[in-house]
Image: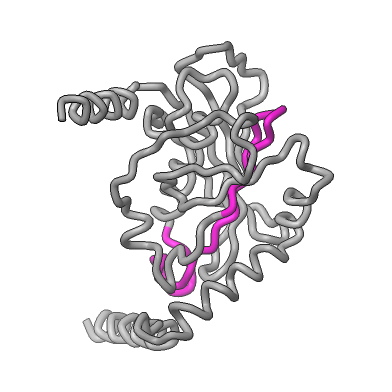
Amino acid sequence: MFALGCLVGYNESVYDLYERATFIDENHTANTELLPRQLEYKLKHLPIYEQLNHPRQAHQWYRLSSWENLDHNPLDGQPATVRAQKEYQAPSITNTTLAKPGGILIKPAIFQNVKTDQGVTIVHCGYRLTGYPFLVHGGVLATLLNETFKRNASLNHNTSSSLKDDFMVEHLEISYKAPTRANQFLVVKTEPQPDTEVKDGTKVINLQSTIESADGKVLVKASARLRDTGRATHQLAAANRKWGVW
């Protein structure tokens, strides 16, 4: 019992120290105004960002900028190249809860390859997204993968819907390869699984993904099977009918 008490006391002190070390005052101007600008600067100077955003890549890689849950999906001046998306305008968990200092403070950068249907998402995960001190919670990583899989499925040229929330992840396998430190940029790379035939109008698609550090270290590997449920399409149609009555 003494040993157990010491262990509990030690863990509490570690978490207390971590909480104090990573505390962020949301009312401080430097955290609400300066920190986002610093992160945006670091994002745009990451080698992978510079590579994909270079004009030489403009014929195949197009950049989207939005929250990970992506209620809106505006393209940067390329409306006819990537499938249009009319997502919901209701607040999401990402832009109300996590989009704060220590969470996902700045909009993730999303690049979509219009030829290969590959996707790359660059997202900064802060200290508030941890389970154990300094390590991103596994549930947060699973959420990033889930949302990225749905986004990639909706942007695929051959799938049956362009609404992300039409797609449901039916099967998800995740393999954690290395601890994922908080307060760093993570790179989520997603693509159709090899030897998977995707026909025009398909309602089921198999995708694979990796989460990497900015320097290319593989932290997580995952695969998923997604199905178009039509949920978002039906909700959007119902909302339009409601407005039509008025």
Is residue 170 in sight in this rendering? Answer: no
In front of the other: 235 or 21: 235
Instruction: Please tell me in which quadrant of the rendered image residue 43 appears.
Output: bottom right
Colour mode of the rendering = one colour
Q: Residue furthest left?
A: 246
Query: Is 219 inside the magenta-drawn segment?
Result: no
Report the label total.
0
> Residue 108 vs residue 217: left or right?
left
Which residues are the magenta region? 109-137
Task: Please name the residue shown 50% across and 14% down the image.
Answer: 202
| Residue 241 in the image: above or below residue 64 | above
Q: Quadrant of the N terminus?
A: bottom left
Instruction: Please tell me in which quadrant of the rendered image residue 234 appears.
Output: top left
In front of the other: 6 or 203: 203
Task: Please name the residue shown 48% across and 73% down the image.
Answer: 134
Task: Please name the residue shown 44% across and 87% down the image.
Answer: 21
Is residue 173 in sight in this rendering? Answer: yes
Q: Residue furthest right?
A: 56
Task: Estimate the x, y position of residue 158 in percent, counting from the top left.
Answer: 57, 18
Task: Estimate the x, y position of residue 194 in percent, counting from the top left.
Answer: 66, 24
Query: Is 111 inside the magenta-drawn segment?
Result: yes
Task: Estimate the x, y position of residue 211 in percent, counting from the top left.
Answer: 59, 50
> Residue 36 vs residue 86: left or right?
right
Q: Residue furthest front?
A: 246
> Residue 121 vs residue 53: left or right?
left
Task: Please name the residue shown 23% across and 30% down the image.
Answer: 239
Task: Estimate the x, y position of residue 149 in percent, counting from the top left.
Answer: 50, 37
